[in-house]
Image: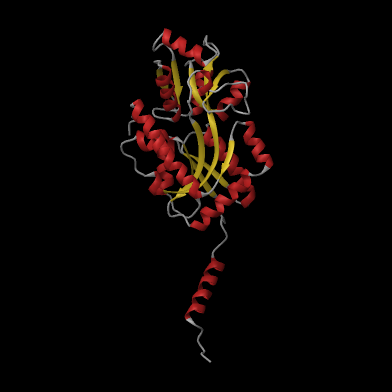
């Protein structure tokens, strides 16, 4: 009898021993980067899913807000992070799609530098107006803007942000001209409408919803093709005179590209489990957010399609952000 075990057996024993030596993921706090200031839709979703994962994992999930440069500062930190699963990144329509065309030079490439994990939620945006504007519907706003070109203004999350691009779509389809007033983040852009500093904005639905319900701003229309269940009395832009108008927001979780596949699959499975929870779905629905889920591969396809979609919009609108 051969006193030495076959090489195949030795290899299997080594793999088993190595696996046993590896601590279960996660065995320490996980950082989730949010490339925007606190209070916006990305931050809200990050904290909700982070709280759920915290309870599921029994380890702290730390939300790290790194705003600036239209989300590019935090996104670059995510791209350059150690790919060990302990730094994840919240991404959205702007940071993972439109910014690829807005900025001539980026220190990262979304498709090359990130491993998709899961699409968390989708949601409409909402056209919100200050209560002092003498227009309550999309046709009335368009008529008012045509009567006084460049007299109406609108806030956005920043130059080249999703709210800016949606407003440019609205201007082009409505045949109107308005003045753009950029702010540093969605919460500040909406606060400007509440305070009467600007006339209107296209806000993330979850951020605008409580302000609309409280009467602080007027919800004029939503940008999805169907009305939002959380605010069914507010019509869509498409049904209000601009057929086919659609601009759906989304929030996803990604990791540095070389993050181990096993960790990506683990986080994806845990997010999908949380999104299927009845209480979680009710919590999201109350904010006008639609739980998504899906596979990492599906998110990768979605991101690539969104990059191309917003590239067309940016080219047609002639928008260009400054690096």
Q: Residue furthest top?
A: 147
Expressed as whole percent of the image width and height from the top left, the position of residue 202 reads 49, 24
Q: Nearer the viewer, residue 24 or 205?
A: 205
Identify which residue is drawn at 35% across, 35% down. 101
Quadrant in the picture for residue 279: top right
| Residue at x 47% of width, y 35% of height | 36
Residue 129 position, x and y percent, is 52, 17
Image mark count: 0
Q: Please tell me whether residue 39 is drawn above or below residue 85 in the rendered image.
A: above
Asked if one can make out residue 319 in the rendered structure from this viewpoint, the answer is: no
Is 23 placed above or below 252 here? below
Residue 302 visible in the displayed image: yes
Q: How is the image coloured?
A: secondary structure
**Could you say which quadrant of the image residue 152 lies in?**
top left
Q: Quadrant of the C terminus?
A: top left
In percent of width and height, residue 135 lies at 52, 11
Outermost right residue? 279
């Amino acid at each position: 009898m051969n006193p030495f075990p076959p090489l195949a057996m030795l290899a299997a024993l080594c793999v088993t021993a190595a696996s046993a030596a590896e601590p279960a993921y996660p065995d320490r706090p996980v950082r989730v980067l949010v490339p925007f200031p606190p209070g916006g839709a990305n931050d809200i979703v990050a904290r909700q899913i982070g709280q759920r994962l915290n309870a599921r994992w029994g380890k702290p999930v730390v939300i790290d807000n790194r705003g600036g440069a239209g989300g590019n500062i935090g996104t670059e930190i995510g791209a350059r992070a150690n790919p060990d699963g302990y730094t994840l990144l919240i991404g959205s329509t702007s940071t993972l799609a439109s910014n690829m065309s807005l900025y001539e030079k980026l220190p990262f490439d979304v498709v090359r530098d990130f491993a998709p994990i899961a699409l968390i939620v989708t949601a409409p945006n909402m056209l919100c107006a200050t209560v002092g504007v003498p227009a309550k519907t999309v046709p009335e706003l368009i008529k008012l803007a045509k009567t006084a070109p460049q007299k109406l203004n609108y806030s956005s999350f920043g130059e080249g942000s999703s709210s800016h691009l949606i407003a440019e779509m609205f201007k082009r389809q409505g045949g109107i001209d308005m003045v753009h007033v950029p702010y540093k983040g969605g919460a500040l852009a909406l606060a400007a409408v509440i305070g009467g500093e600007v006339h209107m904005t296209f806000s993330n639905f979850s951020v605008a919803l409580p302000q609309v319900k409280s009467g602080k701003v007027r919800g004029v229309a939503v940008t999805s093709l169907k009305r939002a269940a959380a605010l069914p009395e507010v019509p869509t832009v498409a049904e209000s005179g601009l057929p086919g108008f659609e601009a759906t927001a989304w929030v996803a979780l990604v990791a540095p590209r070389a993050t181990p596949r096993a960790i990506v699959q683990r986080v994806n499975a845990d997010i999908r489990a949380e999104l299927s929870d009845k209480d979680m779905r009710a919590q999201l629905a109350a904010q006008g957010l639609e739980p998504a889920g899906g596979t990492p591969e599906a998110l990768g396809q979605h991101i690539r399609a969104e990059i191309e979609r917003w590239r067309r919009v940016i080219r047609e609108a002639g928008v260009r952000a400054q690096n």
